[in-house]
């Protein structure tokens, strides 16, 4: 039974993992370039070091999915596995953000003309009703929350 589950999980991961991995790589490359410019201007190398760690994680992300599937579908459980594990809320939140990012990236990449037409057609409606201001404000608050969490995590180290 584990073998059937393993092959189905690997088949699904081959597709879904790739859909998540490509936008993750794009964002990692953009982030690295941004921090390279930041480090060149400010002479602060710490963001560049963290960005390097993200590159290393992104590099093995797709393959690690297959390794994880193989490890957890063996008859013998991996070392350190506990059956009463609780869900890490921060990890789940990061997972949700990664899936949203990947979905938005694919929509914008595959349907740019549709998005431009939608903005042209409905842009006035958003502006008239103050939705642009609302969306920008909400995006700013979310971005501030993400950066505050990262700053907090950095200070805990």
Image (spheres, helix red, strand yellow):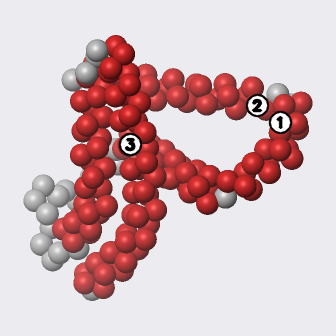
- Residue 88: where, in percent of width, then height? 34, 44
- Residue drawn where x is 38% and y is 34% of the image: 33
Image side of residue 116 versus residue 127, left or right: left
Residue identified by numbered label 3: 29
Q: Is residue 36 above or below residue 3?
A: above
Q: Marks 2/3: CA distance?
A: 28 Å
Kindly state the secondary structure of the residue where label 2 is placed. Answer: helix
Kindly state the secondary structure of the residue where label 1 is placed. Answer: helix
Quarter of the image with the N terminus is bottom left
Residue identified by numbered label 1: 126
- Residue 130: where, in percent of width, then height? 82, 28
Q: Marks 1/3: CA distance?
A: 32 Å
13, 118: nearer the viewer: 118
Query: Are the residues tagged 1 and 2 within 8 Å (C-beta)?
Result: yes
Label 2: few (<14), some (14–19) or many (≥20) C-alpha neighbours in 10 Å? some
32, 99: nearer the viewer: 32
Q: Marks 1/2: CA distance?
A: 6 Å
Query: Are the residues tagged 2 and 3 within 8 Å (C-beta)?
Result: no
- Residue drawn where x is 27% and y is 31% of the image: 50
Residue identified by numbered label 2: 132
Determine which quarter of the picture holds residue 20.
bottom left
Determine which quarter of the picture holds residue 142.
top right
- Residue 30: where, in percent of width, then height? 43, 39
- Residue 52: where, in percent of width, then height? 25, 37
Q: Is residue 89 visible?
A: no
Label 1: few (<14), some (14–19) or many (≥20) C-alpha neighbours in 10 Å? some
């Amino acid at each position: 039974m584990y073998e059937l589950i393993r092959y189905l999980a690997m088949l699904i991961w081959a597709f879904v993992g790739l859909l998540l991995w490509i936008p993750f790589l794009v964002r990692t490359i953009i982030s690295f370039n941004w921090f390279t410019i930041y480090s060149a201007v400010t002479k602060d190398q710490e963001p560049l070091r963290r960005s390097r760690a993200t590159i290393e994680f992104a590099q093995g992300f797709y393959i690690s999915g297959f390794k994880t599937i193989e490890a957890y579908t063996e008859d013998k459980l991996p070392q350190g596995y506990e059956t009463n594990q609780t869900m890490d809320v921060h990890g789940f939140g990061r997972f949700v953000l990664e899936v949203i990012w990947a979905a938005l990236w694919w929509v914008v990449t595959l349907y740019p003309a549709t998005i431009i037409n939608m903005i042209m057609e409905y842009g006035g409606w958003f502006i008239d009703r103050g939705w642009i201001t609302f969306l920008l404000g909400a995006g700013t608050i979310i971005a501030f929350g993400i950066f505050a969490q990262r700053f907090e995590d950095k200070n805990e180290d």
